[in-house]
Image (tube, helix red, strand yellow):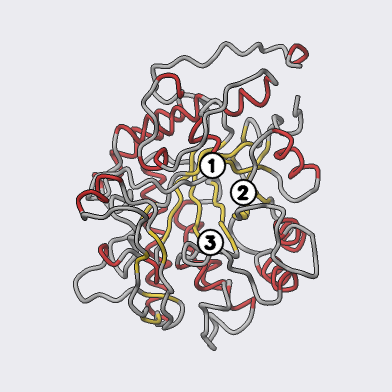
């Protein structure tokens, strides 16, 4: 069942045993100083044990300057302490013969104001101001500590400072430094976060990039920053390590975001990324089929994949094996990226391949911050994988 989905895939020099990728999922589960916890190692290893082909970590800050850190209790990769702590995760994941890459991100104009140094403004491609958004990833304990009840309030952000050319290169060098430390920690590569409203996105999206220099003003110039980051990272970690670049139209502060120009802008973005140093692109959306262009129904991932001629990882509303196979059969992507199903069910790859009945637990946002510790919800490392019958012919 789902033979294409469960066939191997080579991305750069990295071989995936199947085409199921665990999505990068922000959880704020690290210690306050950004040190990854033992719980995080168990969390990732459990999904590796569950059968995914590749794991992409939650967004990780690579330097502690220029407003890079986006969230409280976000993991970092900025020092030896972080490196040693991440080694527990990479070792545990590798014990299940699963590659894992570290997603590196810079918050830009949507970095939580509580993470900025005193009197430090956020930075962005241009001097713009986010409309704000609800920090859904704050913990219930924090809700209590802040004396709040009901829905989380919308957080406002100060106007961002436009990065100078010198600062742009400094930020790119920071990504490279973080990537080098990630490899030292045992990761098989890194993902550059250019999506979901964060700094890379702020350069790619015409709404937030108002520059008229070499880093703005056209699709080709708008992607110059993320290409620079990928180039610097490639030089830092070598040709044998995996680099992916994540893209999206929407952001954490604009769930309905879209690219002006629709698929034509996407074609230009894809063509401009054809010579990017990334081995693969990663499209993120709430629904992978939705391109938000009223004049076309072609999935945006398919358009960018064709224009760039790069392998494409596709994320967005993939809930079962049929959805996953459709991504591959439609030539929209080369692998599927799954988030919510893997939160609630670490054995999701085994489940969909078996075709056996399974009692699905309803997804709950609290799993993001505090994954279930109930054995019946398949979280802890000491729970055994169900004894799935290896004979595919019996899986009907």
Q: According to the image, label 1 marks what residue?
A: 339
Q: Residue at x 68, y 24 (%)?
A: 353
Label pair 3/1, CB-CB below 8 angstroms: no
Q: Which mark is residue 315?
A: 2
Q: Quadrant of residue 6?
A: top right
Marks 1 and 2 sit apart, C-alpha to C-alpha, by 8 Å
Q: Secondary structure at mark 3?
A: loop
Q: Write down the residue under mark 3.
A: 195
Q: Are marks 1 and 2 in contact (CB under 8 Å)?
A: yes
The residue drawn where x is 25% and y is 75% is 120
Drawn side of residue 181 relative to residue 272, left or right: left
**Along the viewing direction, whichever of 355 and 63 lies nearer the viewer:** 355
Nearest to N terminus: mark 1 or mark 2:
2
Q: Where in the figure is residue 116, as x and y percent of width and height?
A: 26, 67
Crowd band around label 3 with a 10 angstrom C-alpha radius: few (<14), some (14–19), many (20+): many
Q: Is residue 204 above or below residue 333?
A: below
Image depth: mark 3 or mark 1 in front = 1
Q: Position of residue 104 (x, y in %)?
A: 43, 55
Tell me which numbered mark, 3 or 2, is placed earlier along the sequence. 3
Which quadrant, please, contains the C terminus? top right
Residue 254 horizontal/vertical position (percent): 52, 67
Disc 3 versus disc 2: distance between alpha carbons? 12 Å
For the N terminus, give its image quadrant. top right
């Amino acid at each position: 069942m789902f033979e294409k989905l469960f066939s191997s895939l080579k991305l750069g020099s990295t071989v995936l045993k199947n085409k199921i990728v665990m999505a990068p999922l922000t959880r704020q589960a690290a210690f306050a100083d950004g040190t990854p916890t033992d719980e995080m190692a168990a969390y990732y290893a459990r999904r590796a044990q569950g059968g995914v082909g590749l794991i992409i970590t939650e967004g990780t800050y690579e330097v502690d300057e220029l407003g890079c850190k986006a969230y409280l209790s976000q993991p970092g990769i900025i020092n030896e302490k972080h490196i040693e702590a991440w080694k527990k995760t990479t070792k545990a994941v590798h014990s299940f013969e699963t590659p894992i890459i570290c997603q590196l991100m810079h918050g830009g104009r949507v970095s939580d104001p509580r993470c900025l140094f005193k009197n430090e403004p956020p930075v962005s491609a241009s001097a713009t101001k986010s409309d704000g958004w609800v920090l859904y990833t704050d913990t219930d304990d924090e809700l209590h500590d802040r004396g709040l009840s009901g829905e989380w309030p919308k957080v406002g952000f100060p106007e961002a400072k436009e990065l100078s050319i010198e600062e742009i290169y400094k930020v790119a060098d920071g990504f490279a430094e973080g990537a080098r430390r990630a490899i030292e920690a045992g990761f098989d590569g890194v993902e550059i976060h250019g999506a979901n409203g964060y700094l890379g996105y702020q350069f790619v999206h015409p709404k937030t990039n108002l520059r008229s220099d070499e880093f703005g003003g056209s699709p080709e110039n708008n992607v110059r920053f993320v290409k620079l980051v990928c180039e610097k990272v490639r030089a830092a970690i070598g040709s044998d390590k995996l680099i992916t670049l994540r893209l999206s139209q929407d952001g954490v502060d604009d769930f309905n975001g879209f690219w002006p120009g629709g698929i034509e802008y996407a074609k230009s973005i894809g063509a401009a990324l054809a010579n990017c140093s990334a081995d693969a692109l990663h499209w993120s959306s709430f629904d992978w089929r939705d391109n938000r262009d009223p004049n076309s129904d072609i999935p945006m991932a398919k358009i960018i994949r064709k224009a760039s001629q790069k392998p494409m990882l596709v994320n967005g509303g993939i809930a079962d094996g049929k959805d996953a196979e459709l991504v591959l059969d439609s030539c929209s992507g080369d692998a599927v990226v799954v988030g919510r199903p893997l939160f609630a069910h670490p054995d999701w790859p085994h489940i969909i391949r078996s075709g056996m009945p399974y009692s699905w637990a309803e997804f709950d946002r609290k799993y993001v911050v505090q994954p279930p510790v109930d054995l019946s919800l398949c979280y802890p490392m000491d729970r055994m994988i169900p004894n799935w019958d290896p004979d595919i012919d019996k899986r009907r």
